[in-house]
Image (cartoon, helix red, strand yellow):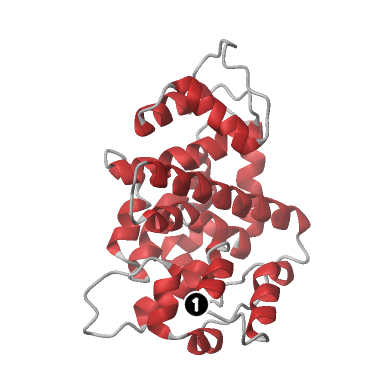
Amino acid sequence: MSEAKGIDHWVAVLTQAELPVLRQTARDLEELRADDEKLTATAVANIIARDPIMTVKLLRYLQQHKHKIQTTEVIQVEQALLMLGIEPVFNKVPPAPLIDDALKSNSPALLHLLRTIHRAHQSSEYAKDWAVRLRDLHFEEVRIAALLHDIAEILMWCFAPDDMLEVERLRILEPTVRTRVIQARVFGFTMFELQRVIAEQWELPQLLLTLMNDSCAHLPRVRNVVLATNLVRHSAKSWDDPALPDDYKDISELLRIPVEDVMQMIAVDAGIACDINQPRRGLDD
């Protein structure tokens, strides 16, 4: 049982393992590497920054090999590439193994993992857009924080798929019980607790840790990340999810625009019809 293994076991597993990446990431990087005219730090960064696991692999490697004279924290993928060099990254942080191979015998877990990664990507895009609206000059830091907000959950789908499927089964059976309570029951710890420990173990930048920490949501940039993650998680259930009205209200306060404008903006982004006059009841998630 995962509970018997404990959090220290899983921190060791995730620290020592070669983290798998999306097949599309590996394919796109291979094609880019073969074309010298297109091979630039920006082009490579655009591919890596879509894949949360490839992104955290790169940042972890950078932290492990940063120069002693480095005084500034690096979160942005392109900055990391410029510091390390494109060729060393290809050699030392290869886009392998592949998620598809790691979970080839567990299709249900693979499907859940891909959905979780998709939500992470959606959250990152919302967070980036809102950061730009708020004239945050370092909006890419906010985007990366949203992309990696649930990285522990993503990694555990790769390395503990059966236990993660048990969490999902119990979530469906007990819809009123919070997910973190079920995680603690199955694993003996929550994904948030695991994420905090591995982030410290990997010495990820302190700024990134802060931006990913929901308890710091009183800070505008962190609140941006939290609200983007909440919006995507709730809308993934249904665009009629009862938690969404509160999300719209919170986003309107963050962006300082009317709730109706928030709903229309999100409806356009999501390509859905949105009746702003329809009454909705908000519930705490």
Circle 1: residue type: Ala
Image point 29% across, 44% down: which residue? 216
Q: Is residue 167 left or right of residue 62?
A: right
Q: Report which quarter residue 274 is drawn in.
A: top right
Identify which residue is drawn at 70% across, 55% down.
Answer: 109
> Residue 201 at x, y = what percent?
35, 70
Which of the two residues, 46 or 109, is positioned nearer the viewer here?
46
Q: Quadrant of the N terminus?
A: bottom right
Residue 127 locus on image (x, y percent):
45, 46
Depicted 122 relative to depicted 264: above or below:
below
Residue that carries the numbered disc 1 in the rendered image = 41
Please say whether residue 1 is visible from this viewpoint. Answer: no
Residue at 63% x, 37% y: name it: 270
Residue 212 x, y percent position in the rendering:
38, 52
Residue situated furthest front in the rendering:
37
Q: Quadrant of residue 32?
A: bottom right
Q: Position of residue 257 (x, y in %)?
A: 40, 26
Compare residues 190 and 262 and report the one nearer the observer.
262
Pick the front one: 285 or 43: 43
**Which structural element holds mark 1?**
helix
